[in-house]
Every structure is written in C-alpha cells, then in structure tokens.
Image: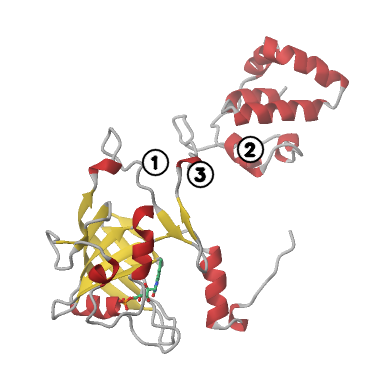
C-alpha cells in the first residue's frame, strides 16, 4: 500500500472538508427541529451527528459556522434561545425533501412548509416532530460547546433524549427496530449518499463461549497467520473462537468422508495450499470450528 501523508496545517479548510467528508462516512443524518424564543420553527439536517452515551442517552450534532462568512446557523441560534430539539431520523423516502430543508432559507421561513413535511406536536418539548420520520427523539439540550472561532468551526449540541416515538411498521416481532425495515440513508462525501438495503446488510457474530473473548490472531500457528489464501476478514473470524479444537477433534474430522479425499490429494500437491483453500470454503459456509480443524491438520 502506497500512503499519501498530508499535514493538516498544509490544507485549506475547503480541502480539509473534502478529506473529512469522504473518509469519515457514511454519517447518519440528524434531522433537527428547533424553535426560537418567538416560536418560529426551524428544520435542518446535520450529518456531524451520532450517539455518544446510552446512560444518560446523549446524542451530539454540530451546526458549524458558515465557511463562507462565518455566520451562525439558525439551528444553533435556536438551541441557545430554547434549549430543546427533536432529532428525527431520515429514511430513503424522505431524503430528497430533507435535502430541500438544507437550503439557506431566511430565519422566518418554516422548512416544514418549504419541504412539504408535517408538523406533529411533541409531548415534552416545544419544537414539533416530523410526522414522516419513522423515529423521533424528543431531546433537551444540556450544553453547547464551541470548537473554534473561524468559518467552519463546529458547535457541539449535546442533546439528551427524553422521549422516543417509533413507527411500529419498522419493528420486528420482539419490538426492536428491524434494520431491514428502517430503510436508513447516510451522507458520504460531496453529493454522495447511501441507502442501507437488505443486500448490503451483514452480521458479525460475537464469540459464543463463556468468556466472550476470542483468542486473537497472535495466538495462531504461523502458517495460518501468514496464509496466502486467508484474507484479513478470514483471520478476524478465526480469531473470534475462544479455544482451538483438540488434537482428537482434528483427527476425527480428518477421517470424515468430506476430508479423506482432500487429505490424500493434499499429500501429493501443496498440502498447506489445499488445506487453506478448504478452510476458506468452510469459513464462507459459516463452519468456523471445522475450518480450524482443517487448518490444524
Ligand atoms: C444531509 C446533510 C447534512 C448536513 N450536515 C451538516 C452538518 O453536520 N453541519 C452543518 O453545519 N451543516 C450541515 N448541513 C448543511 C445544513 O443543513 C445547512 O447549512 C442548513 O441550511 C442549516 O440550516 P439552519 O441555518 O436553518 O440551521 C448538512 C446538509 C445536508 C443536506
């Protein structure tokens, strides 16, 4: 791998923004409704956003000052006046309308009307919810932390979740949010976005044993660690097991019909290559312990 190394101080803010936006992605989108002291409602998307604490339940988003003239965004002004907000989650069906609300409309423009969204009164805070959003978090703003004085400087809005509303259509049979149903979108660099579709969802299994801690790659025999067949992901999966199979288990597996032929073939050709190819196939089938038995033959 040939690395390009860049000193942060050599970049203009605009250049820095491109690297940050494209590399730190996908970013979830926080669609925030706020209200000012006169009751004017504002709605804007922010992808400098995430959850940072579960107990207390804290989300943080960051309206930066405008890079071109260092002015403050209405959302920031509003939470400083009325420290409350609703964080509405954006799904694919509403992403284009959401984008519309990011235009620099004047302070007295209500982006709910501008983009065609429906205001839904909140239970515990003054800003309304976005009725079209499938998850709505009513929050109080505990703190706002300024990260700088120049154009583009962030302002961390620390929002504590007080009430959650979830569209039941996105829940599974156990009442949990189903990643197949929520249809999330996220922001990448520039004009790029992504949609979480069924065909790009995958799971990473936890270690199943009592300790819940995998043995790790440094515990592997050398020829497995430096295999020319196994990928980094294969090593990661193999490293999740808590114990390696015993000599007896390895021997018993080598005598199965599935393995006999391969073991004989492997004696004639490159043994390690054959065994590693078989292990890889077993890993692809989710048979991690059998893959280990092959690797230890
Ligand atoms: C998907 C998306 C994500 C955005 N994320 C941010 C962000 O994290 N921080 C920010 O300052 N502006 C962000 N923007 C731009 C703001 O939404 C935009 O400046 C908006 O006009 C601010 O509105 P306000 O002045 O009414 O608060 C984003 C825009 C879009 C479309």
Q: Where is residue 158 in the image (x, y as percent from the top left)?
A: 29, 68
Q: Do the residues labelled 1 and 2 touch (CB within 8 Å)?
A: no
Lower sequence index among marks 1 and 2: 1
Q: Say if 190 sits above or below 296 in the image.
A: below
In the image, 121 versus 141, the foreground residue is: 121
Residue 91, can we see it?
Answer: no
Q: Check disc 2: other Cα within 10 Å, few if <14, some if 14-19, many if 20+.
A: some
Q: Measuring 45% from the left and 41% from the top, which residue is drawn there?
A: 198
Instruction: Judge left or right: residue 286 versus residue 272.
Output: left
Q: Does the residue labelled 2 lie within 8 Å of ligand 1?
A: no
For the image, the number of numbered tags is: 3
Residue 75, can we see it?
Answer: yes
Q: In which quarter of the image is ligand 1?
A: bottom left
Judging from the image, what secondary structure is the residue with disc 2 in?
helix
Residue wearing tag 1: 180
Badge nearest the viewer, 2 or 3: 3
Q: Measuring 66% from the left and 28% from the top, which residue is drawn there?
A: 281
Quadrant position of the C terminus in the picture? top right
Q: Is mark 3 within 8 Å of ligand 1?
A: no
Q: Residue 234 carries which label?
A: 2
Q: Measuring 50% from the left and 39% from the top, which residue is drawn there?
A: 204
Lower sequence index among marks 3 and 1: 1
Instruction: Judge left or right: residue 198 versus residue 159.
Output: right
Q: Which mark is residue 108?
A: none
Judging from the image, what secondary structure is the residue with disc 3 in?
helix
Instruction: Judge left or right: residue 157 versus residue 199.
Output: left
Mark 3 vs mark 1, CA separation in Å: 10 Å
When asked about the image quadrant of residue 224, the answer is top right
Residue wearing tag 3: 200
Lower sequence index among marks 2 and 3: 3
Q: Position of residue 8 (x, y in %)?
A: 59, 78
Q: Say if 215 sits above or below 130 in the image.
A: above
């Amino acid at each position: 791998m040939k690395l390009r190394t860049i000193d942060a101080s050599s970049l203009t803010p605009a250049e820095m923004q491109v690297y940050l936006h494209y590399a730190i992605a996908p970013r979830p989108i926080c669609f925030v409704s706020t209200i000012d002291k006169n009751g004017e409602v504002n709605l804007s998307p922010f992808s400098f956003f995430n959850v940072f604490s579960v107990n207390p339940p804290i989300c943080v988003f960051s309206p930066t000052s405008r890079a071109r003239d260092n002015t403050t965004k209405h959302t920031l002004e509003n939470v400083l006046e009325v420290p409350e907000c609703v964080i509405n989650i954006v799904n694919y069906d509403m992403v284009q309308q959401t984008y519309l609300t990011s235009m620099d409309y004047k302070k007295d423009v209500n982006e709910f009307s501008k983009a065609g969204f429906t205001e839904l009164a909140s239970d515990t805070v003054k800003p309304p919810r976005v009725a079209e959003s499938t998850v709505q978090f009513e929050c109080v703003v505990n703190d706002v932390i300024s990260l700088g004085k120049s154009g583009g400087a962030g302002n961390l809005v620390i929002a504590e979740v007080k009430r959650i509303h979830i569209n039941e259509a996105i829940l599974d049979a156990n009442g949990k949010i189903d990643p197949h149903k929520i249809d999330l979108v996220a922001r990448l660099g520039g004009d790029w976005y992504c949609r979480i579709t069924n065909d790009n969802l995958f799971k990473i299994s936890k270690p199943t044993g009592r300790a819940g801690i995998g043995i790790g790659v440094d515990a592997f025999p050398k020829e497995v660690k430096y295999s020319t067949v196994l990928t980094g992901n294969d090593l990661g999966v193999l490293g999740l097991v808590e114990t390696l199979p015993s000599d007896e288990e390895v021997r018993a597996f080598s005598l199965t019909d599935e393995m006999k032929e391969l073991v004989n073939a492997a004696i004639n050709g490159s043994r390690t290559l054959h065994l590693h190819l078989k292990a890889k196939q077993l890993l692809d089938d989710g048979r991690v312990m059998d893959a280990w038995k092959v690797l230890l033959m």
